[in-house]
Amino acid sequence: MHTYNYCPVCGSPLQTAEIEYRKRKICPSCSWIHYENPLPVTVAYTENLSGELLVVRRAHEPAYNEWSLPGGFLESGETPQEGCLRELLEETSLLGKIDRLIGAYHRESKMYGSLLVIAYKVIVAEGLLRINHELYEADFYPHEGIPQINIPLHQKIIEDARNHEYQPPV
Ligand SMILES: [Zn+2]
């Protein structure tokens, strides 16, 4: 995670002070304050029309070689829904449609610091699955047969998505 020793605006050495109940770095010359905010990430819980779940094996850190749900960082200027579908398209060539929000989560990542993770249920109606360099493999699996997912947050997202599915109608 990136930390500053010098002010990115004017170049002065930063000092540390308690500002709004947290220790933060502040520039004594121009008063720039380093607010550390979480990075937004989207995750796509993606099903095909048979209700099978798309699971991918990652070819990069973090969670190298782990099975997971597809997703990635939002870009400036895009909505979370757009970012979610863009990541899915980039990684798998599949064009999805947002079905609904599953939830918003917080996670601490060694590599990136605080993350705000927004998970959507996505439906893919058709299309040829073709993975990019970020993945080793990807496929749709029936729910009782998905590969072992070890990332706790992705386990939680799957659980939350399924609990919602199985709620009886009110
Ligand atoms: Zn400064």
Image: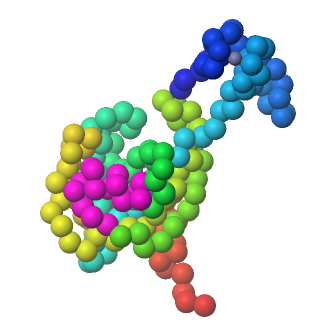
Query: Residue at the spot x=63%, y=11% of the render?
Result: 11
Query: Residue at the spot x=18%, y=67% of the render?
Result: 127
Evaluate whether residue 62 shows in this view. Answer: yes
Q: Is residue 7 above or below residue 77?
A: above
Magenta highlight on residue 87: yes
- For residue 89, which quarter of the picture? bottom left
Number of dots carrying numbers: 0
| Image quadrant occupied by the C terminus | bottom right
Q: Is residue 156 above or below residue 19?
A: below
Horizontal arrangement in the rendering, residue 107 relative to residue 59 (left or right) = right
Evaluate whether residue 144 shows in this view. Answer: no
- What x and y, as percent, mark residue 83? 42, 54
Horizontal arrangement in the rendering, residue 31 relative to residue 74 (left or right) = right
Residue furthest to the bottom:
170
Quadrant of ligand 1 in image: top right
- What x and y, as percent, mark residue 52? 29, 70
- What x and y, as percent, mark residue 79? 48, 57
Query: Residue at the spot x=65%, y=33% of the render?
Result: 36
Region rendered in magenta? 82-96
- What x and y, as percent, mark residue 86? 34, 55
Magenta highlight on residue 35: no
Query: Residue at the spot x=78%, y=14% of the render?
Result: 28
Horizontal arrangement in the rendering, residue 114 relative to residue 86 (left or right) = right
